[in-house]
Image (cartoon, coloured by chain):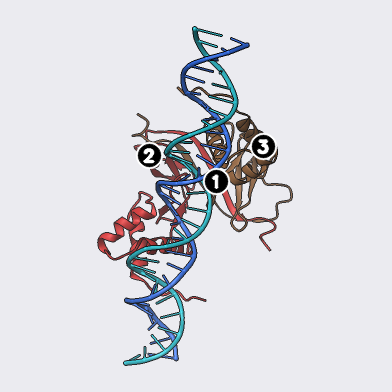
Chain colours: A brown, B red, C cyan, D blue
Amino acid sequence: MATLRHSNQRDAVLKDLQARYDHPTAEEVYLSVKKDFPSISLATVYRNLKLLESEGLILKITTGDSDRFDGHTHNHYHFTCNQCMKVLDVDVDSADFCTLPKDFDGVITGHSLMFFGLCSKCKN
Amino acid sequence: MATLRHSNQRDAVLKDLQARYDHPTAEEVYLSVKKDFPSISLATVYRNLKLLESEGLILKITTGDSDRFDGHTHNHYHFTCNQCMKVLDVDVDSADFCTLPKDFDGVITGHSLMFFGLCSKCKN
DNA sequence: TTGTTAATGATAATCATTATCATTAACTTG
DNA sequence: CAAGTTAATGATAATGATTATCATTAACAA
């Protein structure tokens, strides 16, 4: 049920995410979209982020602090700075493994790999 | 500063985590430790989980919902069921890649790889 | 044994996210 | 095209996990 209807707010949220590469939080998307859409509500941003993620149009990045979002859904990984919490892309080439940004001069101290799906019981 | 002192509560939290393999939440650790230590406070559990993690004695698993903890720090990965949110271990053999539990009959629909460290700016 | 202060227990505060609800606006159907 | 249905919105309250506060207790050094 609940047929999806068009919404300018949703378009604005998606467009904002697709135009940037800094993995913003919901709050940051809100502040950005607000510039062109002054009446938009933070709740609407949260709602649409969730909806867009479930449609597979954006990615939600779960980190230690607030969730971040990514409008680019091609296969790639991420790097989080433990101090400033910034998230950088780690591109995955089909041949090589990962290519950090050309100017990356930080240190990688660890990583975490999580698989998602349905366990034996929940599959049914 | 702030020299670390011995605490029975901290020992109990660590011991509990090392004895189980179900990746409990802070609340679940609290309920478990409470059996042998009725006076322990939830705040103490949170405090010690954070401290033990910073000491490298346990792992914090950041998932979509509440954080979970793992008392086994050898190199291994995780699988989260999107429905029941249970977390399973994914063992990593030095030679092969991953070995899911023998009886694993679920489906893996995706994965997320996150690197941690310090970015160029925060390194200094 | 005593003094210092880290750790605790209880609970208030915080903060990201979600729920609620009256209003608005997409779309459908007559 | 007008009217009705209901998804989406904006504003805000509620939730829930985690952290902060603070008076009290207990490690441990002197």
Q: Please, which chain is the residue tagged with disc 1 on?
A: A
Q: Nearer the viewer, mark 2 or mark 3?
A: 3
Identify the amino acid type marked 3: Phe
The secondary structure type at the circle numbered 1 is: loop
Q: Residues within 10 Å of mark 3 (few under 14, many from 20)?
A: some
Q: Callout 3: helix, strand or loop?
A: loop
Q: Earlier in the sequence, mark 3 or mark 1?
A: 3
Q: Are marks 2 and 3 in contact (CB under 8 Å)?
A: no
Residue A120 lies, with reference to residue A104, above or below; the image says: above
Viewer-closest of A27 and B2: A27
Which of the pair B115/B102 is nearer the observer?
B115
Q: Quarter of the image for the N terminus of chain A: give it.
A: top left
- Which mark, residue A67? 1
Q: Marks 2 and 3: same chain? A: no
Left or right, A92 with respect to D28, comes to right
Report which residue position mark 3 lands on: A37
Q: Chain of mark 3?
A: A
Q: Chain of mark 2?
A: B
- Give the percent coordinates (x, y) of residue B63: 47, 46
For disc 2, the marked residue is: B84
Quadrant in the picture for the C terminus of chain A:
top left
Q: Position of residue B98 (x, y in %)?
A: 46, 42
| Cα–Cα gap, marks 2 and 3 | 38 Å
Could you tell me if residue B74 is visible in this image?
Answer: no
Q: Marks 3 and 1, Cα distance to the nearest angstrom?
A: 23 Å
Helix, strand, or loop for circle 2? loop
Q: Amino acid at mark 2?
A: Cys
Q: Is residue A46 above or below residue B57?
A: above
Residue B41 location (% of width, % of height): 34, 63
